[in-house]
Amino acid sequence: GNKVKHKKYRKINRSEISKLKEPYVAEAIKDVEALTQANDPAILYVDTDKGNGTAFLISPEGYAITCNHVVKDTSEIKARLRILGRQGGSDSWHKCEVINTNETLDIALIMLDGSNFPYLKLADEDRKIRKGEKIILSGYPFGEATSADITLFQGYVASSNLQRDENGNSRFFINGEGKCGNSGSPIIARKDGCVIGVFLGSKTHKGAELTEEINNMRPISYFWENFLK
């Protein structure tokens, strides 16, 4: 049967995301190095009492997207913000609460304590994702083992939107490498620097077997449809 929705889960207003200014200058998307320098501060290392993963900030207030399986059944979630060269130190840890989550889509919206966060720009809801489109994926592929530094993978969208998961939801395969701790990483389009998908990855629980099928992403349009009102 249907799971009882936790009463504290809520949708946020679409305007909170759509009103946001471009987070970086056009110059930032001219090459991969510039784009990753612009994006990296908004990519978070997530540590929970169940395991770890990646998340990415989508607003200055501290809203961030990750995978449901990164935060599911956890009692404590912390995210590390890393802004190199920041006064007072590059790293800060922020407590997070789950604002909403969708197990079927494997997407969760969390919120960090704090304000004035860097953030990534989401592609519009109706943005078409094209086969062969160049992408980058940044995150923490092996959790704690790689938490010292963000790892960048480059690749391209390897399928059309005809791919469906067992629940009938669209997903895309990507040829870019991704590993377990990359779950929740943003998939960023090279051409405009926007987030076009969430990397679903495999289970992030410590000690769990890795599944083979780790290279798929959920289009960001599902976030617009299911988490915003």
Image: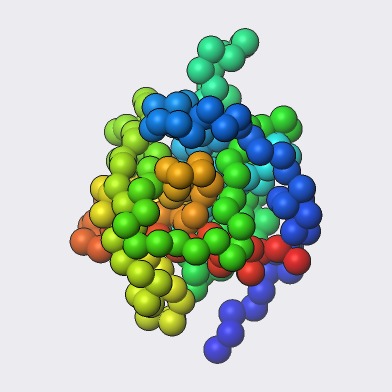
- Can residue 161 be seen here? The reply is yes
In the depicted structure, whether residue 12 falls above or below residue 81:
below
Q: Name the spot of residue 188 as percent of width and height, x first.
A: 45, 46
- Can residue 165 be seen here? The reply is no
Q: Name the spot of residue 180 as percent of width and height, x first.
A: 31, 50
Tell me the quadrant of the picture where the N terminus can be found: bottom right
Viewer-closest of 65 and 70: 65
In the depicted structure, whether residue 81 falls above or below residue 165:
above
Tell me the quadrant of the picture where the C terminus can be found: bottom right
Q: Residue at x 45, y 44 (%)?
A: 191
> Residue 112 sits in which quadrant?
top right
In the depicted structure, whether residue 20 falls above or below residue 199:
above
Q: Name the spot of residue 148 as percent of width and height, x first.
A: 37, 25
> Residue 8 sits in which quadrant?
bottom right
Viewer-closest of 226 and 145: 226
Q: Residue at x 45, y 31 (%)?
A: 30
Q: Residue furthest bottom?
A: 1
Residue 10 as seen in the image, left or right of residue 73: right
Residue 156 as seen in the image, left or right of residue 68: left
Q: How is the image coloured?
A: rainbow
